[in-house]
Image (tube, rainbow, N blue to C red):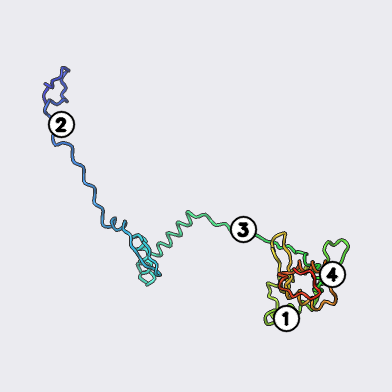
Amino acid sequence: MNDDSGSKKTPNRGWFSKGHCANPGGRPTALPAPRPSVLEILIDKTFTAVRDGIERTLELKEALQQRTYQDALKGKPMAMRQVVKWILERDVWRTKNERPSSPPAITSHISPDPENADAALVLLGIAAPNLARATWTQDRVHLLLEPRWVQAALHRRRGGQRLTNRERDEIQPGSVTSALQPLRMAKKLDPYRETARMALEPWLVEATLALLPRTLGPADQAIVVKATRTPRKVRWPEWWSENP
Protein backbone atom coordinates (compact mmCIF):
# COMPACT_ATOMS: atom_id res chain seq x y z
CA MET A 1 0.00 0.00 0.00
CA ASN A 2 1.09 3.59 -0.62
CA ASP A 3 0.31 6.64 1.47
CA ASP A 4 0.03 8.72 -1.72
CA SER A 5 -3.67 8.12 -2.44
CA GLY A 6 -4.32 11.41 -4.21
CA SER A 7 -6.49 12.65 -1.39
CA LYS A 8 -5.90 15.86 0.50
CA LYS A 9 -7.07 14.14 3.67
CA THR A 10 -4.72 12.54 6.13
CA PRO A 11 -3.42 9.28 4.62
CA ASN A 12 -5.01 6.08 5.97
CA ARG A 13 -3.14 2.87 5.94
CA GLY A 14 -6.31 1.02 4.99
CA TRP A 15 -6.66 2.84 1.70
CA PHE A 16 -5.41 1.36 -1.52
CA SER A 17 -3.62 3.46 -4.08
CA LYS A 18 -4.98 3.91 -7.55
CA GLY A 19 -4.63 0.88 -9.80
CA HIS A 20 -4.70 -1.60 -6.94
CA CYS A 21 -7.72 -3.86 -6.15
CA ALA A 22 -8.47 -5.63 -2.94
CA ASN A 23 -9.92 -8.62 -4.89
CA PRO A 24 -7.75 -9.12 -7.94
CA GLY A 25 -9.50 -12.41 -8.80
CA GLY A 26 -12.90 -10.71 -9.13
CA ARG A 27 -16.25 -11.87 -7.75
CA PRO A 28 -16.34 -15.66 -7.31
CA THR A 29 -18.66 -17.46 -9.69
CA ALA A 30 -21.89 -18.93 -8.30
CA LEU A 31 -21.84 -22.58 -7.43
CA PRO A 32 -23.81 -24.75 -9.88
CA ALA A 33 -27.23 -25.97 -8.70
CA PRO A 34 -27.03 -29.49 -7.27
CA ARG A 35 -28.25 -32.13 -9.64
CA PRO A 36 -31.33 -34.04 -8.41
CA SER A 37 -30.80 -37.56 -7.24
CA VAL A 38 -32.25 -40.54 -9.02
CA LEU A 39 -34.78 -41.01 -6.21
CA GLU A 40 -36.00 -37.40 -6.47
CA ILE A 41 -36.47 -37.84 -10.22
CA LEU A 42 -38.49 -41.02 -9.69
CA ILE A 43 -40.65 -39.46 -6.97
CA ASP A 44 -41.85 -36.78 -9.39
CA LYS A 45 -42.81 -39.35 -12.00
CA THR A 46 -46.25 -40.92 -12.32
CA PHE A 47 -47.23 -44.36 -13.48
CA THR A 48 -50.32 -45.68 -15.24
CA ALA A 49 -51.78 -48.82 -13.73
CA VAL A 50 -54.76 -50.88 -14.90
CA ARG A 51 -56.97 -52.37 -12.20
CA ASP A 52 -60.32 -54.04 -12.83
CA GLY A 53 -60.14 -52.76 -16.39
CA ILE A 54 -59.84 -49.13 -15.27
CA GLU A 55 -56.71 -47.05 -15.86
CA ARG A 56 -55.39 -45.04 -12.93
CA THR A 57 -52.49 -42.61 -12.61
CA LEU A 58 -50.33 -43.41 -9.58
CA GLU A 59 -47.43 -41.59 -8.00
CA LEU A 60 -44.33 -43.57 -7.11
CA LYS A 61 -45.23 -43.70 -3.41
CA GLU A 62 -48.69 -45.09 -4.08
CA ALA A 63 -47.35 -47.54 -6.66
CA LEU A 64 -44.78 -48.84 -4.16
CA GLN A 65 -47.46 -49.16 -1.50
CA GLN A 66 -49.64 -51.15 -3.85
CA ARG A 67 -46.74 -53.44 -4.72
CA THR A 68 -45.86 -53.90 -1.07
CA TYR A 69 -49.48 -54.71 -0.27
CA GLN A 70 -49.63 -57.31 -3.04
CA ASP A 71 -46.37 -58.88 -1.81
CA ALA A 72 -47.79 -59.01 1.72
CA LEU A 73 -50.84 -60.88 0.44
CA LYS A 74 -48.45 -63.38 -1.16
CA GLY A 75 -46.84 -63.99 2.24
CA LYS A 76 -43.51 -62.20 1.79
CA PRO A 77 -42.20 -61.45 5.32
CA MET A 78 -40.67 -58.02 4.66
CA ALA A 79 -43.80 -56.78 2.93
CA MET A 80 -45.99 -58.14 5.73
CA ARG A 81 -43.91 -56.33 8.36
CA GLN A 82 -44.17 -53.10 6.38
CA VAL A 83 -47.94 -53.38 6.08
CA VAL A 84 -48.24 -54.06 9.82
CA LYS A 85 -46.11 -50.96 10.43
CA TRP A 86 -48.45 -48.88 8.25
CA ILE A 87 -51.47 -50.16 10.15
CA LEU A 88 -49.94 -49.30 13.52
CA GLU A 89 -48.92 -45.83 12.29
CA ARG A 90 -52.43 -45.24 10.99
CA ASP A 91 -53.97 -46.28 14.32
CA VAL A 92 -51.68 -43.91 16.21
CA TRP A 93 -52.54 -41.05 13.86
CA ARG A 94 -56.28 -41.70 14.12
CA THR A 95 -56.13 -41.87 17.90
CA LYS A 96 -54.28 -38.55 17.99
CA ASN A 97 -56.18 -36.58 15.35
CA GLU A 98 -59.69 -37.97 15.00
CA ARG A 99 -62.39 -36.90 17.37
CA PRO A 100 -64.35 -39.64 19.11
CA SER A 101 -67.54 -40.23 17.21
CA SER A 102 -70.70 -39.58 19.14
CA PRO A 103 -73.46 -42.18 18.97
CA PRO A 104 -76.04 -41.42 16.27
CA ALA A 105 -79.13 -39.65 17.43
CA ILE A 106 -82.17 -41.88 17.59
CA THR A 107 -85.29 -40.29 16.20
CA SER A 108 -88.53 -41.86 17.27
CA HIS A 109 -91.44 -41.48 14.91
CA ILE A 110 -94.88 -42.04 16.39
CA SER A 111 -97.59 -42.80 13.91
CA PRO A 112 -101.03 -41.41 14.78
CA ASP A 113 -104.12 -43.59 15.00
CA PRO A 114 -106.47 -42.07 12.41
CA GLU A 115 -110.21 -42.49 12.80
CA ASN A 116 -111.31 -41.37 9.32
CA ALA A 117 -112.33 -44.92 8.33
CA ASP A 118 -114.27 -45.77 11.51
CA ALA A 119 -117.64 -44.80 10.04
CA ALA A 120 -116.99 -46.77 6.83
CA LEU A 121 -115.96 -49.83 8.86
CA VAL A 122 -119.27 -49.77 10.71
CA LEU A 123 -121.37 -49.05 7.58
CA LEU A 124 -119.78 -51.99 5.73
CA GLY A 125 -120.11 -54.35 8.70
CA ILE A 126 -116.34 -54.83 9.01
CA ALA A 127 -116.32 -53.63 12.61
CA ALA A 128 -118.89 -53.01 15.32
CA PRO A 129 -118.91 -50.77 18.42
CA ASN A 130 -117.64 -52.39 21.59
CA LEU A 131 -120.50 -51.75 24.00
CA ALA A 132 -118.49 -53.10 26.93
CA ARG A 133 -116.10 -50.16 26.67
CA ALA A 134 -118.56 -47.47 25.66
CA THR A 135 -118.56 -44.42 27.92
CA TRP A 136 -120.22 -41.03 27.71
CA THR A 137 -116.90 -39.19 28.07
CA GLN A 138 -115.12 -41.15 25.32
CA ASP A 139 -114.32 -39.04 22.25
CA ARG A 140 -113.87 -42.01 19.96
CA VAL A 141 -116.07 -45.09 19.86
CA HIS A 142 -114.10 -48.29 20.51
CA LEU A 143 -114.54 -50.79 17.67
CA LEU A 144 -114.06 -54.54 17.32
CA LEU A 145 -113.35 -56.26 14.00
CA GLU A 146 -115.84 -58.87 12.91
CA PRO A 147 -114.23 -62.36 13.02
CA ARG A 148 -115.48 -63.29 9.55
CA TRP A 149 -113.52 -60.49 7.91
CA VAL A 150 -110.39 -61.19 9.96
CA GLN A 151 -110.57 -64.80 8.75
CA ALA A 152 -111.07 -63.63 5.18
CA ALA A 153 -108.03 -61.38 5.43
CA LEU A 154 -105.89 -64.18 6.86
CA HIS A 155 -107.11 -66.57 4.15
CA ARG A 156 -105.97 -64.12 1.48
CA ARG A 157 -102.41 -64.22 2.74
CA ARG A 158 -100.11 -66.33 0.59
CA GLY A 159 -100.47 -69.93 1.70
CA GLY A 160 -102.60 -68.85 4.65
CA GLN A 161 -99.50 -67.62 6.47
CA ARG A 162 -99.85 -66.38 10.00
CA LEU A 163 -98.91 -62.92 11.11
CA THR A 164 -95.20 -62.41 11.70
CA ASN A 165 -93.87 -61.20 15.04
CA ARG A 166 -93.26 -57.77 13.54
CA GLU A 167 -96.83 -57.56 12.27
CA ARG A 168 -98.14 -58.59 15.68
CA ASP A 169 -96.06 -55.87 17.31
CA GLU A 170 -97.70 -53.27 15.05
CA ILE A 171 -101.13 -54.10 16.48
CA GLN A 172 -101.86 -51.89 19.47
CA PRO A 173 -104.27 -53.13 22.13
CA GLY A 174 -107.64 -51.42 21.82
CA SER A 175 -106.94 -50.04 18.32
CA VAL A 176 -108.77 -51.42 15.30
CA THR A 177 -106.91 -49.29 12.77
CA SER A 178 -103.52 -50.64 13.89
CA ALA A 179 -104.71 -54.16 12.97
CA LEU A 180 -106.02 -53.25 9.52
CA GLN A 181 -102.63 -52.79 7.86
CA PRO A 182 -100.94 -56.00 9.15
CA LEU A 183 -104.05 -57.88 8.01
CA ARG A 184 -103.81 -56.08 4.66
CA MET A 185 -107.36 -54.86 5.02
CA ALA A 186 -106.27 -51.22 4.71
CA LYS A 187 -103.20 -49.07 4.23
CA LYS A 188 -102.16 -46.11 6.32
CA LEU A 189 -101.35 -43.12 4.13
CA ASP A 190 -98.98 -40.38 5.37
CA PRO A 191 -98.28 -42.54 8.43
CA TYR A 192 -96.07 -40.06 10.31
CA ARG A 193 -98.00 -36.88 9.64
CA GLU A 194 -101.01 -35.28 11.22
CA THR A 195 -102.82 -35.91 7.94
CA ALA A 196 -102.47 -39.70 8.37
CA ARG A 197 -105.55 -41.63 7.28
CA MET A 198 -106.62 -45.21 6.72
CA ALA A 199 -107.61 -46.32 3.21
CA LEU A 200 -109.59 -49.54 2.93
CA GLU A 201 -108.39 -52.05 0.35
CA PRO A 202 -110.66 -52.46 -2.71
CA TRP A 203 -111.06 -56.21 -2.23
CA LEU A 204 -112.46 -55.69 1.28
CA VAL A 205 -114.94 -52.98 0.21
CA GLU A 206 -116.13 -55.07 -2.73
CA ALA A 207 -116.54 -58.23 -0.64
CA THR A 208 -118.48 -56.51 2.13
CA LEU A 209 -120.81 -54.72 -0.29
CA ALA A 210 -121.63 -58.06 -1.94
CA LEU A 211 -122.87 -59.41 1.42
CA LEU A 212 -124.41 -56.22 2.76
CA PRO A 213 -128.07 -56.94 3.71
CA ARG A 214 -129.20 -53.40 2.89
CA THR A 215 -128.44 -50.56 0.52
CA LEU A 216 -126.68 -47.38 1.57
CA GLY A 217 -127.92 -43.86 0.96
CA PRO A 218 -125.88 -41.29 -1.00
CA ALA A 219 -124.37 -39.75 2.15
CA ASP A 220 -123.19 -43.13 3.46
CA GLN A 221 -121.89 -44.06 0.02
CA ALA A 222 -119.77 -40.91 -0.05
CA ILE A 223 -118.26 -41.87 3.32
CA VAL A 224 -117.30 -45.32 1.99
CA VAL A 225 -115.81 -43.94 -1.25
CA LYS A 226 -113.74 -41.39 0.68
CA ALA A 227 -112.36 -44.13 2.94
CA THR A 228 -111.47 -46.49 0.06
CA ARG A 229 -108.03 -46.82 -1.43
CA THR A 230 -108.11 -46.54 -5.27
CA PRO A 231 -111.94 -46.59 -5.37
CA ARG A 232 -111.91 -46.86 -9.18
CA LYS A 233 -110.74 -50.46 -8.84
CA VAL A 234 -113.88 -51.42 -6.91
CA ARG A 235 -116.75 -53.05 -8.79
CA TRP A 236 -119.56 -51.13 -7.16
CA PRO A 237 -123.04 -52.72 -7.02
CA GLU A 238 -125.76 -51.67 -9.49
CA TRP A 239 -127.64 -49.63 -6.88
CA TRP A 240 -124.53 -47.57 -6.10
CA SER A 241 -124.96 -43.95 -7.15
CA GLU A 242 -121.93 -42.15 -5.70
CA ASN A 243 -119.31 -43.20 -8.24
CA PRO A 244 -115.75 -41.96 -7.58
Q: Quadrant of residue 156?
A: bottom right
Q: Which residue is mark 2?
A: 22
Image marks 3 and 4: residues in contact by CB distance under 8 Å: no
Q: Nearer the viewer, mark 1 or mark 4?
A: 4
Residue 78 can be seen in this image = yes
The span from disc 2 to disc 1 (Cα, nearest Å) is 116 Å
Q: Is residue 18 above or below residue 74?
A: above
Give whichever of discs 2 and 1 has the lower sequence position. 2
Q: How many residues crowd around disc 1 within 10 Å: few (fewer than 14), some, or many (20 or more)?
A: some
Quarter holding the C terminus is: bottom right
Q: Nearer the viewer, residue 110 or 120?
A: 120
Give whichever of discs 3 and 1 has the lower sequence position. 3
Q: Which residue is mark 3?
A: 105
Query: Where is residue 165 drawn, in percent x and y?
Result: 68, 74
The span from disc 2 to disc 4 (Cα, nearest Å) is 125 Å
Q: Which residue is mark 1?
A: 155
Q: Secondary structure at mark 1?
A: helix
Give whichever of discs 1 and 4 has the lower sequence position. 1
